[in-house]
Amino acid sequence: MRTISYKTYIDKIYGCFIGKAVSGNIGAPYEGVKMPLELPYSPKMINCDLANDDLDLQVLWLDVLEQKGEHFTSYDLLDRFVNHCSYSPGEYAVMRKNYSRGIYPPVSGKFCNDYYMEGMGCPIRSELWGCVGVGNMTLASEFASRDGQLDHFGESIWAERFLAALESEAFFESDLDVLLDRALRVLPLDSKFRGLVCFTRELCEAYGDIKTVLCKLLFRYGHPDCTNMYQNMGITLAALLLGEGDIIKTSLLALNCGFDTDCTCATAGAIIGLLRGADELMRAYSLTEVPYALGVESSRRSNRIFDLAEDIAKMGIQFSKTVNSCVVIMDAPRVHFDFDPPEPIAVRVLYQDMKPSIALGESRVITLHFENRSDNAKKLDCRIDSVNGILCSMPDFVLELPARARSQVAVTFTLPMGTELVYDKNIFTLTAGSAGKIAFQKQFGLAGAVPWKLCGPFWRTEPVCTTEALLKVSSYYELMVNSRVQGNDTDKARQFHLNFAADTDTEFVTEHVLFEPLKEQHAGCDCEQTLVNIREDSFCLKDMFGFQGPCTVYLSRILVVPEDMEVCVQIGHTCPFQFFANGALVAERNYCDSWTAENVHVEGLHLHRGENRIVLRVTRVNADAKMNVTFSKEAACSEHIVDFASRNPYCF
């Protein structure tokens, strides 16, 4: 059993969030700069007038704790975000999109999130959990896990758990190396993030120079996304290890490494604030009352960090009497909360292989896990409402749950092959009750895999070698004179024999072919035509067919829109493409790029109510041909649109 005085407890929480605000403000103006910098310190850097999601979302989470107590769920946090936060960068847009489709944690952090899944968005939210789980690494890291799985999966969640554990221990230990050793206990031995922590410590000990450490970190862990977790957590840890406990020096070390500077600075500053406490920080740096700016909707009693710290401390006091038996907070004020009672029956939705999508002609098993938290047995009549032509194997069933018992029901959902429209969003409602009274309702969803008609692949040789051309020469080698391949004759011949040529200029099919109904037999056609189901936003051509080498394919889709609207189309690509909407060329790129979830943004695309003809022409130049297509309300940090449907290509 550990003891801590309330005076020390509140001083450290206050210091933590002073550090979070001050250091976050130092880094915020330079967020996203990927080059090493040499920015000098200026006193105006610590004027905390910039809102920062690092703090914003923790304020929302505190609102949830005050309502739900220790029984808060990941869904509670996600619901608060969706309804009280207006911005949606990166993984935040993905989790909001999944929420809209009835796809909740932990799947909301994984599905359609392959680019941002290991981002900084959740490690930056760790301080609250460390503070309310004071001195209890297990509790703090478990709370952090409930948070991290909203919008991440795997290693980023481990990073948040690690920070929360370290911060919970920082109330009792001031040696950073000891804290790092202890926090490592919450990480699996094979964790990639654990390897990053150990590697960063080795580098700092061996070199003691932040720029040398940065070079070696990026050599091993560098990522093009400025918000990727690995490089930024490495920068944060290096700044802490080399900053000598000075919050300004530490913040500038982090800042001048570049990348996600508001996050790296804010996390480092929060840890130093915890270690040193508010009184020491304010004396050392001549700080007065520190306010914070908020970019989300919350009814906190003020914008004073002390008031925020005091409210967090109240929650920690409450938990020390319920779920945190590791700590006694001496001389703590009396606190009382009227938390919402937990639901008597909890329901969890588990998707087969964590894949919450369904395609034409496919069946998908969803397992419903029920837990009776009450002391009374329950017998409930249950019904699942089907939507959008998706069939349910058990629309009605009886659920019998003894007191304090658990049970599970596996339900199969099927989307018949002949269904005319496939909806992006398919929300099912489970209603349970008895004697005509509803006991509870639970909603969950399946994303409809987008059905595209694929025509192709098309290719040519270089030079083009047609029957007509061959009959005009004694040997096809004579055609090599006109080859566009650079190099000598041997290069041209070997290219001809060993490869195909990519062609971004030739049109191989007409729109009529692209939008004629698919048929099981299409004899006489000069290209393969088939249905491909795109389950997530991103896809690769190699997963659609076995043809190897450069080629062009056409993907056509009839998009059904509920009303006239202006949208932004976001396109990620590694290869040349053209995107057409209703016959007009909307976007094109004739070069290869490093894939992101949103390389290209086309604003102001008009979609009219009803059917819209979409064509994506993709030219694979090399083995990598990855694409991404999403529709959003606006270009930057905006909500994705999920109210569309797509016509079955067999029903074009």
Image (cartoon, grey):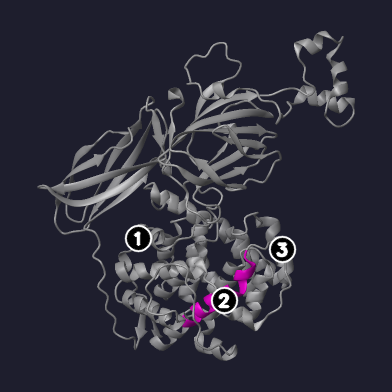
Give the residue pinned by disc 3. 35
Task: Let me know if residue 95 is in the magenta part.
Answer: no
User: Residue 235, image x and y in percent?
Assistant: 64, 67
> Label 3 is placed on what type of residue?
Met
- For the point 42% across and 84% down, which residue is it? 10
User: Residue 461, image x and y in percent?
Assistant: 75, 22
> Label 1 is placed on what type of residue?
Asp
User: Residue 152, image x and y in percent?
Assistant: 49, 55
Measure the alpha-carbon separation of dots 2 and 1. Answer: 28 Å
Q: Nearer the viewer, residue 587 or 650?
A: 587
Q: Is residue 449 above or below residue 432?
A: above
- For the point 50% across and 21% down, which residue is it? 516
- For the point 55% across and 57% down, which residue is it? 119
Asked if residue 158 shows in the view, the reply is yes
Give the residue pinned by disc 2. 269
Indicate which disc, 3 or 1, sits on the residue closer to the N terminus: 3
Q: 10 Å neighbourhood of mark 1: few (<14), some, or many (≥20)? A: some
Measure the alpha-carbon separation of dots 3 and 1. Answer: 38 Å
Q: Is residue 427 above or below residue 234?
A: above
Q: Secondary structure at mark 2?
A: helix
- For the point 63% across and 45% down, which residue is it? 595
Q: Is residue 606 above or below residue 467?
A: below
> Label 2 is placed on what type of residue?
Gly
Give the residue pinned by disc 1. 76
